[in-house]
Image (cartoon, rainbow, N blue to C red):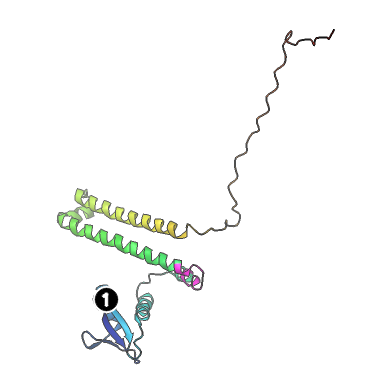
Amino acid sequence: MATPRIIKKYPNRRLYDTETSTYITLAEVKDLVLGYKDFQVQDAKSGEDLTRAILLQIILEEESGGVPMFSTDMLANIIRYYGHSMQGLMGSYLERSIHAFHEAQKRFQEQAQVLIPKVPPDTFTNIISGQPIPQVMGGYLEKGAKAVIDMQDELRTQAFKLFSGFPYAQPPGEGPAEEPPVTPVPPKAAPKPTRGSARKPRTRK
């Protein structure tokens, strides 16, 4: 396994890249993430791993300055799981969900790279003018939709596997489903004796 790129963080909050021997900014650390570069941020004095703290700082800046990814309700729900008995399971579920989404997106991009070169140059002009879309473009859209559906199925399967072992109380006002009433079957009447069928008891002599 390759040794991760070491970035040292100094008390003045400056980040020093030991590979390039230069100081870098938080935006450049973000570029390393986007480039799938393996790195580790360490405290310059103690050697403590600060990678998570730096990544959280990047997320905070993106959520504050750019287009936020997390809604207020979602952040509140995540906070509620801290200290909860299911905190570990929640983290595992989110990690698997993001991984499944990432894999679906990667498959979609791979399919796009194969199909886009085959699309005729006038395809998008035809779309704007209302003309029929070529068959290859329709296949591209169909495969893209299938990738999204597969991702949703994967997330649903993981959720069922994760939470299937935990019983949940019925919501207020919702009880167990009532069984349909069973109509009692009346008992069958005993057959009536026919005339002449009854035998008279014999008298003893």
> Residue visible at 15% across and 57% down?
117
What residue range appears in magenta?
A: 77-88
- In this rendering, is residue 65 above or below 144? below
Seen from this angle, which residue lies furthest front?
A: 205
Mark 1 surroundings: few (<14), some (14-19) or many (≥20) residues within 10 A: few
The one nearer the camera, 178 or 193, is 193
Image location of residue 7, percent across then percent down? 28, 84
> Residue visible at 32% across and 89% down?
44
| Quadrant location of the C terminus in the rendered image | top right
Seen from this angle, which residue lies furthest right?
A: 205
The one nearer the camera, 62 or 154, is 154
- In this rendering, is residue 36 above or below 164? below
Count how many numbered circles sit on residues in the image.
Answer: 1
Image location of residue 204, percent across then percent down? 83, 9
Please indicate whether residue 116 sits to the left or right of residue 12 in the image: left
Q: Is residue 85 magenta?
A: yes
> Residue visible at 22% across and 88% down?
21
Q: Is residue 72 magenta?
A: no
| Quadrant location of the N terminus in the rendered image | bottom left
- In this rendering, is residue 14 above or below 94? below
> Residue visible at 27% across and 73% down?
34
Q: Give the image quarter of residue 60.
A: bottom left
Image location of residue 39, percent across then percent down? 28, 79
Mark 1: secondary structure: loop
The one nearer the camera, 131 or 142, is 142
Q: Is residue 163 visible?
A: yes
Q: Amino acid at mark 1?
A: Asp
Q: Is residue 134 visible?
A: no
- In this rendering, is residue 56 above or below 92? below
Image location of residue 189, percent across then percent down? 70, 22
Instruction: Provide the residue designation for mark 1.
Output: 38
